[in-house]
Image: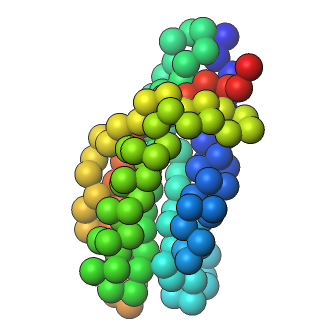
Amino acid sequence: MTALVDIELELITRGTARFPDAVVRDELDNRLLGELPTIQIEQIPGGGDDGLRLARLIVDINVYAATRTDAINLAREVHDWVTGELRGSSGDSIVIGRTGCLSLPAIRPYENTSLRRVGATYEVFCHPVS
């Protein structure tokens, strides 16, 4: 049976190492303007598993930055990280097999006009380390 994995924690841990100049987190707080750039990683409902080991997880990643250009550039780096560097990698708890982009990075509205948000949705195929 497929074991559940905490994909948010796994990607936040890896993302913090990969993007040392950004705050990588799952939940936003009231200090967002003082913690730019921020990369928000959230698992969203969906996905599934093969009933044996392989899980398909859906992850939404939002990038918050002071300017549109900064947000777009960081979102492009995150996209390359998820679709390239993460593919075929392993960590302490999971092995990531395949990754894909379900919704390409694009400007997403945000109620605070003092910053910009760019988001994308990804699928991550993974299984626990055996």
Q: Quadrant of residue 111?
A: bottom left
Q: Quadrant of the N terminus?
A: top right
Q: Quadrant of residue 54?
A: top right
Q: Residue at coordinates 56% horizontally, 77% vertically from top-left?
A: 21
- Compared with residue 109, is residue 17 higher up or lower down, i.e. above or below? above
- Compared with residue 113, is residue 57 higher up or lower down, i.e. above or below? above
Count every numbered label the image shows and give the total.
0
Res 127 visible: yes
Name the colour scheme: rainbow
Q: Residue at coordinates 38% horizontally, 44% vertically from top-left?
A: 83
Q: Pinpoint residue 33: horizontal percent, then vertical percent.
A: 51, 87
Question: In the picture provided, is 76 more to the left or to the right than 3?
Answer: left
Res 27 visible: no
Q: Pinpoint residue 79: horizontal percent, then vertical percent.
A: 36, 54
Q: Which sits in the foreground, 42 or 91? A: 91
- Compared with residue 85, is residue 108 higher up or lower down, i.e. above or below? below
Q: Residue at coordinates 55% horizontally, 28% vertically from top-left?
A: 126
Q: Quadrant of residue 100?
A: top left
Q: Pinpoint residue 117: horizontal percent, then vertical percent.
A: 36, 72
Q: Pinpoint residue 96: horizontal percent, then vertical percent.
A: 54, 33
Question: In the picture provided, is 95 more to the left or to the right than 64?
Answer: right
Q: Residue at coordinates 49% horizontally, 22% vertically from top-left?
A: 48
Q: Which sits in the foreground, 5 or 27? A: 5
